Image (cartoon, rainbow, N blue to C red):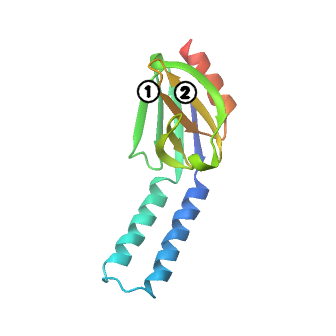
Amino acid sequence: MVRYEHTQRGTVVQVALLIGAMVCFGLSRFLPAPPFVVPMVLVVFVVCAYMFSSLTIHVTDRALHWYFGPGIFRKTLALEDIKTVEVTRTRLLEGWGVHKTARGWLYNVSGFDAVLITLHGGKGILLGTDEPDRLRSVLLRAIK
């Protein structure tokens, strides 16, 4: 049974990647490059904009699931592995996307609100969300 499901749009990430594609295209007119380079780079920017267009999080009776955009990159975490859950804010330097931070792996497409999940082994996971209090409440009820 799904206890929670929410999708946050990644408008900032999409706009940044599309601006990057336009800058790349603009610079290509002034810099010499093989003819296949510009189309390849543009395709990479557009595919990344699509892949990181949103972050969907859902909680079932047994697990926490999250995925970006169309769902090609999916992660699942058993609820029994969660030790603590707290609302937090990411720092500007932690940015967006998927990468390791000092507090653990970050998964975020927009904004700075997040939920920090600490696992029994001590590792952390930061899930960006525009509903941090609601996600925290659902997770706390689910792990009890």
x 54%, y 27%: residue: 117
The residue identified by callout 1 is 77
Q: Dot 2: within a 10 Å radius of its alpha carbon, few (fewer than 14), some, or many (20 or more) residues?
A: many
x 61%, y 16%: residue: 141
User: Could you tell me the amino acid type at mark 2?
Assistant: Ile
Q: Position of residue 110 (x, y in %)?
A: 61, 49
Image-based side of 136 in relation to 45, left or right = right
Can residue 110 be spotted in the picture?
A: no
Which image quadrant is residue 76 in?
A: top left
Q: Position of residue 56 (x, y in %)?
A: 53, 41
x 39%, y 70%: residue: 41
The reply to whether discs 1 and 2 touch (Cβ–Cβ < 8 Å) is yes
Q: Is residue 129 above or below residue 52?
A: above
* Circle 1: element type: strand
The residue identified by callout 2 is 117
Question: Who is closer to the viewer here, 117 or 101?
Answer: 101
Question: Who is closer to the viewer here, 100 or 79?
Answer: 100
Q: Is residue 81 above or below residue 72?
A: above
Q: Dot 1: within a 10 Å radius of its alpha carbon, few (fewer than 14), some, or many (20 or more) residues?
A: some
Residue, far top: 144
